[in-house]
Image (tube, rainbow, N blue to C red):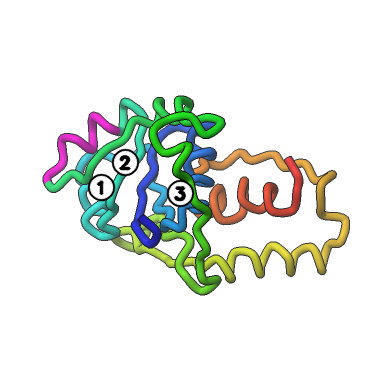
Amino acid sequence: RPGDRIGISGSNSLAWVATAFAVLKCGCMLCPMNERFVASEFAYLTGFCEPALVVADAPRREILASTAGCPPLLALEDVEACRDGAGDAGADWRPVRVDADTAAMMVFTSGSSGTPKGVMLSHREQLGKFFEMTLVAPELGPQTQSLMPLSVQSAPGTAWGYLFSSVIGGT
């Protein structure tokens, strides 16, 4: 449902990125979770952000399932089955209109000074910084190619990586 917090955890993959876009397109809040976490760290994050669902690959689902208060889990591997509108909800899809000031994502700090903290980023903040960058560097656009050595779950990977490239039309 729009406004729900949806966690994603898994190794870098196209399915991960597709799921992140789906979460945002549905009007939900994206909560990327570090794929290197152990059970206690996943338990902390799911307790902190209270996701309605966590989409995770097999190794992370196994860890998450072992935590107390585990939220509902969906297999990241099953995302491919929803391609091109297939699946149960394909025919019933309705676009969701989201207020620009609604939180788009909650990214977590590294926790180097203690436990990770959730930082909320709104749709307006995200798009505003992307378009401001194109004003400063007008050469950014469809011809832009990005190499992303960072994990997609990290704040730089999500907030600056694939979302930025996609919004400006790059690859």
Q: What residue type is labelled 2?
A: Phe
Q: Which amino acid does label 3 sit on?
A: Val
Q: Name the outermost residue toward the right.
A: 139
**Vertical order, 31 against 82 (above or below):** below
Q: In which quarter of the image is the N terminus?
A: bottom left
**In the rendered view, does 167 fall on the left or right side of 40?**
right
What mark, if any, has residue 41 been given in the picture? 1
Q: How far apart are marks 2 and 3 (CA)?
A: 22 Å
Between 133 and 103, the one nearer to me in the picture: 103
Query: Residue at 55% of width from left, 66% of height from top?
Result: 123
Q: Mark 3 points at which residue?
A: 23
Q: Distance between the residues labelled 3 and 1?
A: 22 Å
Between 17 and 133, the one nearer to me in the picture: 17
Query: Residue at 73% of width from left, 65% of height from top?
Result: 131
Rendering coords of residue 85 (x, y %): 52, 34
> Within 10 angstroms of label 3, few (less than 14), some, or many (20 or more) residues?
many
Q: Name the outermost residue toward the bottom.
A: 101
* Mark 2 vs 1: CB contact within 8 A: yes
- Label 2: element kind: loop
* Mark 2 vs 3: CB contact within 8 A: no
Q: Does the magenta stretch include residue 96?
A: no
Query: Residue at 23% of width from left, 33% of height from top?
Result: 63
Q: Distance between the residues labelled 2 and 1?
A: 6 Å
**Which range of residues does the magenta coloring cover?**
61-68
**Toward which corner of the image does residue 129 lie, by quadrant?**
bottom right
Q: Mark 2 points at which residue?
A: 37
> Within 10 angstroms of label 2, few (less than 14), some, or many (20 or more) residues?
some
Q: Closer to us: mark 3 or mark 1?
A: 3
